Amino acid sequence: QRYSLAVLFFSTFSSNELPTLDSLKDLEDKPVTALGEGWKDRTNWLTSKGHCSWAGVQCHHRDGTSLTNTVYDGNEGVTVLNLTANNLDGTLPGEIKGLGDLRILDLGDNLIQGTLPAALGHLEALQMLYLDGNGIDGTLPRSMGELVHVTHIYMSNNYLEGQIPVELSNLSNLHTLALYQNSLTGTLPDLSGLSALEYLYLDSNYITGEMPESLADLTALTDLRLGDNELTGAVPARLCELDSLVTLYLEENFIGGSIMDCVGNMKSLAELQLYGNRVGGSIPDAIGDLPSLEILYIDDNELEGPLPSYLGKLENLVSVYAQNNLLTGQIPHELSALTNLQRLYLHDNRLQGQVPAQLGALKSLQKVRLHGNDLSGQVPMDICMLKDHSLVDLQGDCA
């Protein structure tokens, strides 16, 4: 394992050449300080001290010692390698597979480049993998499907490309998969094998095609983020089966269809972001059956018909963004029951009638935008007087 660590050091210490085995035989005699600036913290690395004392390294505790005694002058099996934000600059070597006892690998927020070695999948004991915030490119190795004990994978903010390998569906212990802000393409594979998955972050990529209905098989999901991709088609009605889902981000895609009539079944939903798509039809009354809903962003779509009065049932609602649609009818006075409402954006629709004076009861209201409609009259004084309280942004003509 000492050899694997040494290869990692030379591979990421601004060196273009990997050391040979012969060059590593006398590690304790190598003048590491002569290699340049390199890592921020390289305490004890490549010295005569045991690798369990090297910066960022933890090992199995020794017999007869405390379970927390994982840093010491010895050469036991490495269980944790945490070199986050340590100025690692280079490639991740295949020799990493020699760290067979590794549970946590955290190399996030560095300057690691190049492709991921297939040997990454040989870390059979690995539970947490953090490679986010680097410059890694190429495709995800299919061998990652062999990391059967892994619970967390963070590889966001890189340059990963290609399709998400279906082999990841083998990771039945995975709780978090974060691949956002990469350059992933292709369609979403069937990931229904991820039975423990709670957080799926795939936003800000170039993923295409329709959302697979198999997403509904991820029954443990609480947070699903697919925004800022190139998804098409309608939202599968089966997503309504995800009754533990708290956050659903589908914004900035090419999604069409309509808001599912069954949306009211998603009782845990607190945030729904559908803005910047091609969703049409009317807003279903069932949206009023979401008792936990706090954020509703459905702006910049093709929604039509009235704003449902049932929105007034959502006592936890904080923000409603419904601007830039084709909404008609009147602003429902039932919105006056939303005592926690802070932002109400209804501008650039086809709303008619007068602004309900009852909205003046919304003492938490901070921003109201009603311009660009066919409203008659002026904004009631009860609403305008909110400027003396919380209201800082009112775009409408006061009486």
Image (cartoon, helix red, strand yellow):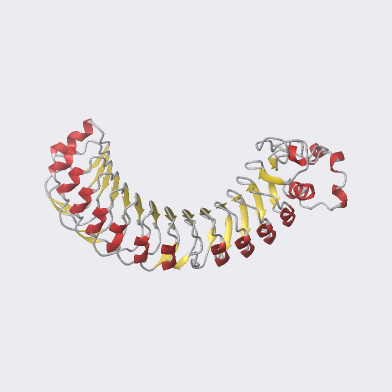
Above or below, 294 against 303 in this view is above
Residue 108 drawn above or below residue 118 = above
Q: What residue is rendered at 40% in x and 55% in y?
A: 249
Q: Does 6 sit left or right of 210 as displayed?
A: right
In this view, which residue lies farthest toward the front?
64
Residue 340: which quarter of the image?
Answer: top left
Q: In which quarter of the view is residue 259 placed?
A: bottom left
* In the foreground, 44 or 161: 44
Residue 106 on image: x %, y %:
63, 46
- Looking at the picture, how far across and down is residue 158, in whole percent? 58, 53
The residue located at (68%, 49%) in the rendering is 102
Q: Is 389 situated above or below 328?
A: above
- How far across and how far down the image is residue 124, in percent? 66, 56
> Does any portion of residue 234 appear in the rendered image?
yes
Position of residue 376 measured from the top left corner of the image (x, y, whole percent): 12, 50
Residue 115 appears in the rendering: no
Answer left or right for 351 relative to 321: left
Give left or right: position of 380 versus 300. left
Quadrant in which the C terminus is drawn: top left
* Direction from residue 328 to residue 144 in the image, left or right: right
Residue at the farthest top position: 388
